[in-house]
């Protein structure tokens, strides 16, 4: 039992003060002011009237039958949230409401407008809190500013951050803490570190990247490869107990939108002092590894260093070097061998990883090109080059080396874990793959290898992208935890996140643990499993919050883009079937939309096992992978929703004798198409009215 549990079960051990964090599911975690005290789980029933980041007083108890802590909030000492931003919904009584979509408040807010701002239903507003949850007046705020019209694309990022509950600003205390820091590494900070400034380390990142977390160096000898992965030493600057650390922990991660970043750390650190910029000395934590020609790790050493990146290389430039090995590329002649040896090592590591059971999922991300007003000008799938995989393999190797270090030393740590998919998900996946023509079942034996073989059946096939997405959806969610169950998708028994401390707080924790385990200076300590488990839960929630926000901004930009195509026809492929309709992805753009069930036909039944909609009476059938022709019917930029309707000839499988179902007819002009869409909308609204 923990050293904190000295009294009899059921009695409060002590009363502590600190900050509270709300989980989206309603429970909370208490972070004590005293760094020697672990975080405490707060059950949902004790979170009534408490908002995220409130300073509270908590009575701590031992958890019945376990070794973790739980507590009851006995008093709110200070409210730290004084203003809220959200989507204003007008009520009939003249007042409004902000809904708690971020789950950080614990209650929806009633909104007044005493200063008569020109606010209307649907506006984004900034609200000053007048009374809090639990007060006699209830949770009430007053409008202090109206954010510009929702139609302005420049406001998309800020409103998604606000609606997602992602902090964007840094506290005044944090900004004051970093205001006096130099943009360059001071000489005193270099003392006691290994000097790698002459080693030709390089960064390989995206063209628009500014926060360079990692640099690599690879050379080859008669025994194998020498790989150095140098990671920005964020832990040297971000210390526990500081406002800077509190802000970073609250954010949990940087959030990346098209042409916009909400950074975990102030730009003075993320883009300057910690960023491994070319030709500038920077502090780093190094994983120095020796590998044989089969990619097996033979030896590893961890240490603090001073490095100087010898080149800032983009993925495209690295790919040019790899593709033109025999040609001179003067700009990178001095680091050409590093890139080529890294490519050689990456190929070996990839073969080894897939042989050991790692899943080979290729799911390109959506790339959105914006003009200076924030309007999307094109939307496509980003091309994944080998140079992307090269860096990925180097980072995977470093992450595994650090995780194995913790495991061998039996040091409590925070791991990146990924559980085996459940049986129901596998059964559904098997059914989907059989529907699409797969010859082999998934299950039993080496599950990863069987999934990989199933994926290989569809390599180069038109349905390959859809298959990869379906497999990904069947997987469990990767998360952070102190209980190391391994990473199913990557096939690693030991895995953590070490390589991105500028943008991920779990990596910062890993750096501190690594330094503590190696006795690399004062100020670093090991953490208990309870502390790590609490941090893992919170930081996993922060990660999912950012992932959802990133998906939402992409959906909004897609809807903005498709508004210009209302009434126009496109070729598409059905990517998913649900009981309420079918999703189809356009062939011309990386955009999908919903074809509602009522638009697909009459009397359709949902066959979940085979992922299809069908009618035994008419012979009409829709399955994943079917080509269809659609017309863009609606593009809602408020919630990022796109609706399609079928164009004539849009049905692939239909009995020729059937006359019951008549697909949406193609009109001869955009104006006629728009009339048809309006008619479809009216039809839907009438049907909805009958069901209310």
Image (cartoon, rainbow, N blue to C red):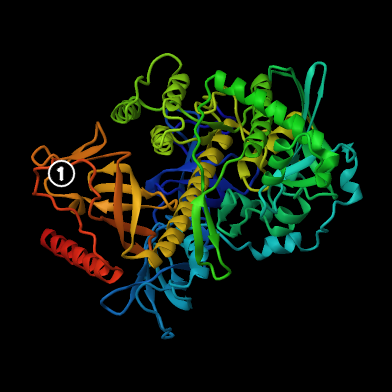
Splitting the image into 4 quarters, where does residue 682 fall? bottom left
User: What residue is disc 1 on?
Assistant: 604
Q: Quadrant of the C terminus?
A: bottom left
* Label 1 crowd bin: few (<14), some (14–19), many (20+), radius 10 Å: many
Q: Label 1: state its secondary structure.
A: loop
Q: Please provide percent x and percent y for residue 451.
A: 43, 24
Q: Is residue 521 above or below residue 81?
A: above
Which residue is pictured at 44% across the width and 63% down the height? 561
Query: Could you say which is closer to the camera, residue 436 or residue 278?
Result: 436
Q: As drawn, is 563 to the left or to the right of 144?
A: left
As drawn, the residue found furthest toward the bottom would be 116
Q: Please provide percent x and percent y for residue 442.
A: 37, 21
Which residue is pictured at 23% across the width and 51% down the height? 649
Splitting the image into 4 quarters, where does residue 218 fall? top right
Q: Is residue 568 above or below residue 607?
A: below
Q: Is residue 465 above or below residue 223?
A: below
Q: Please provide percent x and percent y for residue 155.
A: 50, 69
């Amino acid at each position: 039992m923990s050293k904190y549990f000295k009294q009899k079960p059921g009695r409060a051990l002590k009363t502590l003060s600190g900050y509270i964090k709300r989980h989206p599911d309603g429970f909370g975690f208490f972070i004590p002011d005293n760094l020697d005290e672990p975080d405490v789980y707060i059950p949902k029933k004790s979170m009534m009237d408490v908002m995220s980041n409130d300073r509270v007083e908590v009575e701590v108890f031992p958890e019945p039958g376990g070794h973790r802590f739980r507590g009851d909030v006995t008093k709110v000492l200070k409210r730290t949230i004084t203003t809220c931003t959200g989507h204003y919904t007008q009520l009939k009584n003249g007042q409004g409401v902000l809904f708690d979509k971020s789950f950080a408040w614990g209650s929806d807010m009633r909104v007044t407008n005493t200063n008569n701002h020109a606010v209307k239903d649907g506006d984004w507003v900034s609200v000053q809190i007048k009374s809090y949850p639990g007060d006699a007046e209830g949770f009430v705020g007053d409008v202090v500013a109206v954010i510009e019209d929702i139609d302005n694309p420049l406001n998309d990022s800020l409103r998604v951050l606000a609606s997602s509950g992602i902090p964007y600003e840094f506290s005044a205390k944090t900004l004051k803490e970093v205001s006096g820091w130099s943009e360059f590494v001071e000489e005193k900070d270099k003392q006691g570190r290994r000097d790698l400034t002459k080693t030709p380390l390089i960064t390989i990142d995206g063209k628009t990247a500014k926060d360079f977390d990692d640099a690599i160096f690879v050379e080859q000898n008669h025994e194998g490869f020498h790989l150095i992965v140098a990671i920005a030493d964020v832990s040297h600057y971000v210390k526990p107990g500081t406002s800077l650390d509190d802000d970073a922990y609250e954010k949990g991660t940087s959030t990346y939108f098209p042409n916009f970043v909400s950074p975990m750390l102030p730009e003075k650190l993320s883009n300057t002092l910690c960023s491994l910029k070319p030709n500038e000395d920077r502090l780093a934590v190094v994983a120095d590894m020796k590998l044989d020609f089969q990619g097996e790790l033979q030896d590893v050493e961890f240490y603090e260093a001073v490095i100087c990146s010898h080149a800032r290389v983009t993925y495209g430039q690295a790919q040019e070097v790899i593709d033109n090995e025999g040609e001179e590329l003067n700009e990178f002649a001095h680091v050409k061998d590093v890139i080529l040896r890294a490519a050689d090592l990456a190929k070996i590591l990839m073969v080894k990883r897939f042989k050991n059971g790692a899943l080979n999922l290729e799911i390109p991300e959506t790339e959105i090109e914006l003009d200076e007003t924030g309007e999307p000008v094109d939307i496509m799938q980003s091309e994944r080059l080998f140079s992307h995989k090269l860096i990925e393999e180097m980072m995977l190797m470093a992450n595994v080396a650090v995780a194995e270090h913790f495991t061998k030393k039996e040091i409590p740590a925070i791991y990146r874990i990924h559980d085996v998919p459940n049986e129901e998900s596998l059964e559904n996946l098997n059914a989907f793959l059989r529907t699409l023509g797969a010859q082999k079942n998934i299950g039993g034996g080496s599950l990863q290898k069987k999934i990989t073989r199933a994926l290989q059946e569809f390599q180069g096939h038109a349905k390959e992208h859809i298959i990869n997405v379906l497999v990904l959806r069947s997987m469990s969610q990767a998360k952070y935890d102190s209980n190391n169950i391994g990473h199913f998708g990557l096939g690693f028994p030991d895995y953590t996140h070490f390589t991105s401390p500028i943008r991920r707080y779990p990596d910062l924790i890993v750096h501190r643990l690594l330094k503590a385990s190696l006795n690399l200076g004062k100020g670093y300590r090991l953490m208990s499993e309870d502390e790590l488990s609490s941090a893992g839960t919170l930081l996993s929630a922060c990660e999912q919050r950012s992932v959802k926000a990133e998906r939402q901004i992409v959906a909004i930009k897609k809807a903005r883009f498709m508004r210009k195509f209302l009434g126009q026809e496109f070729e598409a492929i059905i990517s998913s079937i649900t009981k309420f309709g079918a999703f189809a992805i356009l062939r011309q753009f990386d955009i999908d939309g919903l074809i509602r069930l009522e638009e697909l036909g009459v009397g359709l039944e949902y066959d979940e096992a085979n992922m299809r909609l069908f009618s035994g009476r008419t012979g009409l059938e829709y399955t994943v992978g079917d080509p269809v022709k659609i017309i863009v019917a609606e593009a809602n930029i408020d919630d990022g929703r796109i609706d399609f309707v079928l164009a004539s000839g849009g049905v692939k499988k239909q009995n020729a004798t059937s006359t019951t179902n008549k697909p949406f007819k193609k009109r001869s002009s955009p104006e006629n198409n728009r009339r048809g869409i309006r008619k479809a909308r009216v039809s839907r609204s009438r049907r909805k009215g009958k069901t209310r």
